[in-house]
Image (cartoon, coloured by chain):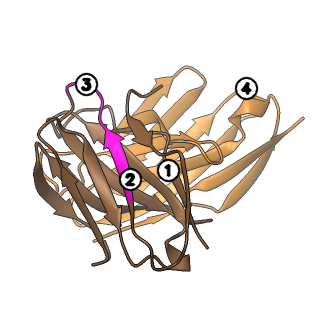
Chain colours: A brown, B orange
Amino acid sequence: DSGVTQTPKHLITATGQRVTLRCSPRSGDLSVYWYQQSLDQGLQFLIQYYNGEERAKGNILERFSAQQFPDLHSELNLSSLELGDSALYFCASSGGGGTSGQGPFFGPGTRLTVL
Amino acid sequence: GQNIDQPTEMTATEGAIVQINCTYQTSGFNGLFWYQQHAGEAPTFLSYNVLDGLEEKGRFSSFLSRSKGYSYLLLKELQMKDSASYLCAVRDPQNTGFQKLVFGTGTRLLVSP
């Protein structure tokens, strides 16, 4: 158990809908990273928040947005869903240091299926 | 940007040794990571290299050559539970002070009896 929690574990919805994925980082971690993993593809970085502020952005679609709240949990909002958005969405967290030899810790993921 | 290459799939026998290679091209370098990921599960951290050489951790070792843009993960005394994907990742040097990782597509390892 990495200490990172994600809800829900599974989500099935229809095209055009909007969903919210939730992540709680490990205790004490200030950074949250969101990744998307489609079938047979690698982990694609979406966005990073640090202590409530956006710090880095990857190839995140305009239909997707995220935020980190004062209690440090984060939410990833996906709207106008398309079939191609079906994927595993992982949240990871890390402390404030960038030279640590310990990589970020990943949550169990949310499996999104768009029908 | 960063580009990371790994073999797509490898097979090996229980009890054997396997080496999974990773080559990368990055603008700057700030550390290389290996993660293990069982199907449908979260990636879990295996090893980290930032200096050239070999890092050993039990049955797993990881090697780095920064001049060659090359790393490998060595798994000894393979067990059936080692069947998983192994992900090579580099820390984004532009993401100073943080842990944003750029991942390769992963190598699926199948261990047979």
Residue B112 placement (x, y as % from top left) = 86, 40
| Label 4 chain ID | B
Q: Which of marks 2 and 3 is nearer the N terminus?
A: 2
User: At 11% from the left edge and 42% from the top edge, which residue is drawn?
Assistant: A51
Quadrant of the image containing the C terminus of chain B: top right
Which secondary structure lies at badge 1? Answer: strand
Is there any visible trace of residue A95 in the rendered image? Answer: yes
As helix, strand or loop, the secondary structure at mark 2 comes to: strand
How crowded pointer 3 is (Cα within 10 Å; few <14, some 14-19, many 20+) is rated as few
- Give me the residue at 16% from left, 35% from top: A71
Q: Give the range drawn in magenta.
A: A20-28
Classify mark 4: helix, strand or loop. loop
Q: Distance between the residues labelled 2 and 3?
A: 19 Å
Q: How far apart are marks 2 and 4 (CA)?
A: 39 Å
Q: Which of B64 and A61 is in front in this view?
A: A61
User: Is B68 a magenta residue?
Assistant: no
Hey, what amino acid is under mark 2?
Leu
Query: Are the numbered discs 1 and 2 placed on the same chain, yes or no?
Result: yes
Q: Label 4: few (<14), some or many (≥20) within 10 Å?
A: few
